[in-house]
Amino acid sequence: MSALFSPIEVKGVRFKNRVAMPPMVTLKADAEGCVTDVIVEHYAARARAGTGLVIVEATAVESGAVWRGGLAAFEGTHAPGLARLAERIHREGAVAAIQLVHGGPQASVEVTDGKRVGPSAVTPPDDGPIPRELAVEEIEAIEGSFVKAAERAIEVGFDGAEIHGAHNYLLDTFLSAKYNVREDGYGGSIRGRMRMLVETCRRAKERIGDRGLVWCRISIFNKLEEGFGRDELQELAPGLEETGIDMLHISTDGTFKEHFDSGKSIGQLVQGLCNLPVIVAGGLGDPADAERAVAEGHCDFAAVGNAMYEDARWTERARRTLEV
Ligand SMILES: Cc1cc2nc3c(=O)[nH]c(=O)nc-3n(C[C@H](O)[C@H](O)[C@H](O)COP(=O)(O)O)c2cc1C
């Protein structure tokens, strides 16, 4: 009996298995950020292979917020293409979600016209131009853009909206003591630094209610050097759970790796801090590892990135390899 290929239900949404395609940009949207046929076929193929959860790539919540070729969900004109994409993923048998992003201090200079924004005016993670510090009203407005995009995604047919709080994009840089040196309520201690992510999750979930799932993705890479360790995780995980979100997605450089000198993997740590179902990505391209990750309790969903990007039929192959 395979743990990876066993079903799971989250708040009334049934997933036929625990295989997740994590968000991965294709950069194949048209000039306006609309869905193209190539994008539809890309996701359809991974759903058709039997993947339980398909999370569509990082999709911009505001104009000029990310990169050229990126998908967008901030205008009504984006809706028909997104509806077509969600419908197609469903038709191929998967649960459909979409990741929503603001690039912040890591948005491509090609689209921001040199006007990057961030928590603080400090050298950004990519060593590019220094961003302008966001005013509190602007923070609230961006949170509102996430909420609107999440609502649009659910209204066009997606089952879930994932708030991108990972990989040094806007919401993640707020978590960091290195990139966030604000002295107001959105900086300082972890309580302040996590405020924008927490407010965004709470507002999105409140707006969507039981019409769809809402969760967020965080990442654990250079966290210690960014002033984020075990104590911060201990605040963040329950803080996110309190917002009412339905799951937590963690991007790592190794699902089985020990984190924060705890003797535990990040999935095990987070599961000890909150009751949210957990998706974990990182190094699970070998079906045996994806199986082990779920079977040994490192995650509820195993997200397979690069390997599924390269091989549209990864899930089908995994099922055969594991003799399910
Ligand atoms: C081509 C490519 C594009 C990616 N785009 C995104 C993205 O849009 N959003 C995101 O959160 N992570 C993105 N990632 C990271 C993956 O979601 C995943 O976390 C990472 O590849 C680790 O999983 P793996 O070891 O199975 O590849 C991307 C990765 C790849 C290879």
Image: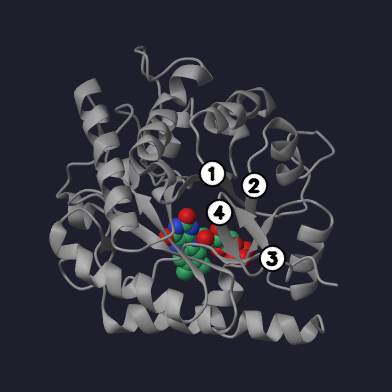
Labels 2 & 1 near each other (Cβ < 8 A) = yes
Considering only order in the chain, which callout, 1 or 3, is on the residue closer to the N terminus?
A: 3
Q: Report x, y in % for residue 130.
A: 28, 36
Q: Amino acid at mark 1?
A: Asp
The mark lying in front, picked from 1 and 4, is: 4
In three-dimensional space, the C-alpha distance between marks 4 and 2, rounded to whole angstroms, equals: 13 Å
Secondary structure at badge 4 equals loop
In three-dimensional space, the C-alpha distance between marks 2 and 3, rounded to whole angstroms, equals: 13 Å
In three-dimensional space, the C-alpha distance between marks 2 and 1, rounded to whole angstroms, equals: 7 Å
For label 2, the residue is: 277
Labels 2 & 3 near each other (Cβ < 8 A) = no
Instruction: Report which quarter residue 221 is drawn in.
Output: top right
In three-dimensional space, the C-alpha distance between marks 1 and 4, rounded to whole angstroms, equals: 11 Å
For the residue with label 3, is its CB less than 8 Å from the closest atom of ligand 1?
no
For the point 60% across and 80% down, the residue is 50
Q: Is residue 273 above or below residue 259?
A: above
Q: Amino acid at mark 3?
A: Pro
The front one of 176 and 130 is 176
Crowding at dot 3, Cα within 10 Å, few <14 / some 14-19 / many 20+, comes out as: few
Q: Which mark is residue 12?
A: 4
Secondary structure at badge 1 equals loop
For label 1, the residue is: 246
Labels 4 & 3 near each other (Cβ < 8 A) = no
The front one of 113 and 193 is 193
